[in-house]
Image (cartoon, grey):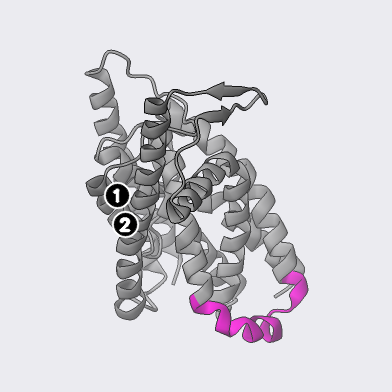
Amino acid sequence: MTVFEGIVLGVLQGIAEFLPISSSGHLALAQNLFGLEEVPLLFDVFLHLATLLAVVLFFWKKIWYLLCAFGRLIARRPAPVEVKNADGSKTVLNEQDALAKEKNLRTYILAVILATIVTGVLGIFVEKKLDDLPVKFICIGFFITSAFLISSSLIEKKRAAKTADGSAKAADAYAKAPSWWQSLIIGFAQGIGTLPGISRSGSTIAGSLFCGVDRAEAGEFSFIVSIPAILGAFILEVKDIGEVASSIGAAPVLAGCAAAFASGYLALTWLMKLIRKGKLEWFACYLIPAGILGLIFLH
């Protein structure tokens, strides 16, 4: 693999990881077009780690709140009554509000854990039972992702029209956490996203919208819940790090990771704006033609 090919794959990973068009599917298609049939899976995981860094940077405040709440839970410390605002000022909460926000953060942590467990079980099944699928299956996955995006957008817009205010509110550090049953559905949707050609972000956001999660919160939770999934995949594949170094080389890996991080952060910023506007179905306009062309020309 050349440095140029590594950069192309990195850009594809960064864009397709966050935009609901399937990063694994596009990486597989690009590797097929480049004739890179023996690329180790760990290389893809390295690119995922680079996009994971973009997620951490973008949602650092929410992640920090969750880590602090988890630490207080382990140490059995009470909820803080003094909260630091984004502008540096501080707000003093009454005890009832402090407890409510702490409970919500703990519910959010539980939601991430539940969704991760469901995703992990499905991911193991997919790896064992559905490995080495033909490349044309990726194109079918594009159609499935399109169906998820269109149907979830229609359902969410119909639900929003029945409310007094159908506009999506911006996510904040204390946005309402998904319930336990919503977490199971979202985890199942993310597990489906491990199939080639099916977008993880697309299926997870669609699953969130299906079960009534707010648009902005659906986007935020979709990417935060990807953190343990990506770390888990890296741990499972890290044993092959020597294979990556020998078969690809360090330069293409580093170039690909840098490209994945930069393009991923930009794509994530744009996608969160589209989610709040309820425009996810737009991506079906790309996925459906791409799937048709892939079925016709790829072998």
x and y percent of residue 158 in the render? 24, 25
Instruction: Give yes or no for contact between labels 2 and 1 (Cβ–Cβ under 8 Å).
Output: yes
x and y percent of residue 64 in the render? 56, 45
Q: What amino acid type is highlighted by mark number 2? A: Leu
Dot 1: within a 10 Å radius of its alpha carbon, few (fewer than 14), some, or many (20 or more) residues?
many
Dot 2: what SS? helix
Verify whether residue 246 appears in magenta: yes
**Residue drawn 40% across the image and 50% down it:** 109
Query: Who is closer to the viewer here, 135 or 60?
Result: 60
Picture quadrant where residue 265 is located? top right
Residue 183 numbered mark, or none = 1
Q: Which residues are magenta?
A: 236-252
x and y percent of residue 129 in the render? 29, 78
**Residue drawn 46% across the image and 55% down it:** 226
Residue that carries the numbered disc 2 in the rendered image: 114
- State whether the magenta stretch is mostly helix, strand or loop: helix
Verify whether residue 297 appears in magenta: no
Q: In the image, 280: left or right of 8? A: left
**Residue drawn 41% across the image and 38% down it:** 102
**Residue drawn 56% across the image and 65% down it:** 30
